[in-house]
C-alpha cells in the first residue's frame, strides 16, 4: 500500500525536470504561491467532503498529492518527515 506513496514521490521528483507547460506537478513546484493555494484549497475541500460525507477519499488523495508536491517544492524531504514521525513513536 505505501509503495504507492513512494511511487508518487518518485514521479513528483521526476516531474521537477519536465516542462511546466506539459506537467501540472512541475508547474506547482515552480510556482510556490500556486502550490500554497492548492494545498489550502484541497484541505478546505476535504473538510467540506467530510462534513457532507461525500468524496472523502478523492479529496484526501488530492490533499496528500498537493502536500507532497509542496514539500518537494520547498526542499522538505518526505523521508525526513517520516523519520521525524518515527522518532515520535512511543
Image (cartoon, rainbow, N blue to C red):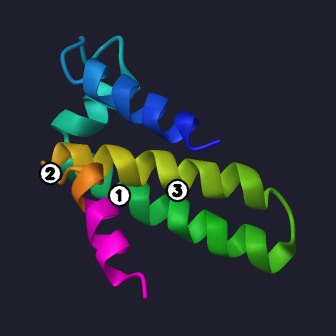
How far apart are the alpha carbons under marks 2 and 1?
Answer: 14 Å
Element on which disc 1 rests: helix
Q: Earlier in the sequence, mark 1 or mark 3?
A: 1
Mark in the foreground, 2 or 1: 2
Q: Position of residue 10 (x, y in %)?
A: 36, 27
In the depicted view, which residue is nearer to us: 18 or 81?
Answer: 81
Task: Point out residue 22 in the picture as x, y percentages from the top left corner.
Answer: 35, 11
Q: Whole-percent x and y of residue 78?
A: 29, 51
Task: Specify the segment rendered in magenta.
Answer: 81-90
Residue 34 at x, y percent in the picture: 29, 48
67 sits to left or right of 47: left
The quarter of the image holding the N terminus is top right
Q: Are marks 1 and 3 in contact (CB under 8 Å)?
A: no
Residue that numbered label 1 is attached to:
37
Residue at x 19% of width, y 40% of height? 31
Q: What residue sits 72% from the left and 49% below the top?
A: 58
Q: Residue at x 78, y 80 (%)?
A: 51
* Front residue of 77 and 38: 77
Residue situated furthest right in the rendering: 53
Closest to the observer: 1 or 15?
1
Which residue in the protein does label 2 denote? 74
Residue 48: quarter of image: bottom right
Q: Quadrant of the image for the C terminus?
A: bottom left
Q: Are marks 3 and 2 in contact (CB under 8 Å)?
A: no
> Label 3 belongs to which residue?
63
Local packing at callout 2 (Cα closer than 10 Å; few below 14, some 14-19, many 20+) is few
Q: Residues within 10 Å of mark 1 (few under 14, many from 20)?
A: few
Magenta segment includes 44: no
Magenta span contains residue 83: yes
- Dot 3 or dot 2: first in sequence order is 3
Amino acid at each position: 500500500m505505501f509503495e504507492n506513496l513512494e511511487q508518487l514521490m518518485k514521479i513528483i521528483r521526476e516531474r521537477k525536470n519536465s516542462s511546466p507547460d506539459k506537467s501540472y506537478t512541475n508547474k506547482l513546484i515552480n510556482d510556490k504561491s500556486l502550490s500554497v493555494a492548492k494545498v489550502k484549497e484541497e484541505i478546505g475541500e476535504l473538510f467540506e467532503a467530510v462534513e457532507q460525507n461525500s468524496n472523502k477519499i478523492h479529496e484526501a488523495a488530492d490533499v496528500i498529492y498537493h502536500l507532497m508536491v509542496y514539500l518537494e517544492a520547498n526542499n522538505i524531504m518526505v523521508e525526513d518527515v517520516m523519520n521525524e514521525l518515527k522518532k515520535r513513536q512511543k
